[in-house]
Image (cartoon, rainbow, N blue to C red):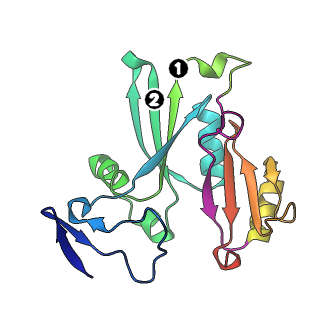
Amino acid sequence: MTMSTNDNNATIAQPANSISTDGVQSISTQTTGFTFNHTMLRVKDPAKSLAFYTGVLGMTLLAVKKFPDMEFDLYFLAKLTESERENLPAGDDLEIFAFRQRGILELTHNYGTETKADFSYHDGNQEPQGFGHICFNVPNLADAVAWFDKNNVEFKKRPEDGSMKNIAFIKDVDGYWIEIVQADLMS
């Protein structure tokens, strides 16, 4: 680990094996301990979304924050290992655990959206484009595709379609895209 000081701001060099391109900078020591914890998606009906993310993608609900005065609720989910599931803390420790993790999915439900038949959120992939997708790595892409088919999951792109082979895109119940990859097929 290489450290340098520039304008009284200590930095750590990016790892030698990481990718370098325009814009990549050294890591400020001020960011030591920072963890990318979660990304948020707004959902129309939390029961349907929770059924999809827990039942189809195998995530675990770790925290719920309710804000009735502001008319929204937050649901925090993670894809846990078997060991993490077996050793999951309880009570307040569970919420602390949730906010120390990497790769948490926050689902935000604004009250009333579930009763509006014609209501939907922008998925970020139509004009104007913005947010694109989240991604899950799976141990076996073919098995995952079969599982999604069995569960009537809508595909945006199957692995054999298009020029990007070995990558699938499915849609959640709100139409958000979820990329499905098998890591050892990505090189």
Residue 74 position (above or below residue 159): above
Name the residue furthest right: 161
* SS at badge 1: loop
Image coordinates for residue 168, horizontal then vertical, percent? 76, 60
Q: Quadrant of the N terminus?
A: bottom left
What's the residue at 65%, 68% (across, down)? Answer: 138
What's the residue at 16%, 70% (across, down)? Answer: 5
User: Was residue 135 drawn as part of the magenta stretch in this picture?
Assistant: yes
From the viewer's side, name the closer residue of 127 and 79. 127
In 3D space, how far apart are the residues under numbered discs 1 and 2 (Cα atoms)? 8 Å
Q: What number is the disc on residue 102?
A: none
From the viewer's side, name the closer residue of 77 and 170. 170
Image coordinates for residue 81, horizontal then vertical, percent? 50, 68
What residue span does the magenta drawing correspond to? 121-140
Image coordinates for residue 164, horizontal then vertical, percent? 79, 65
From the viewer's side, name the closer residue of 91 and 176. 176
Image coordinates for residue 185, horizontal then vertical, percent? 71, 77
Left or right of residue 127, residue 87 in this image: left
- The residue that disc 1 covers is 111
- The residue that disc 2 covers is 73
Left or right of residue 8, residue 106 in this image: right
Residue 136 position (above or below residue 26): above
Secondary structure mainly formed by the magenta segment: loop
Q: Quadrant of the C terminus?
A: bottom right
Residue 37 position (above or below residue 13): above
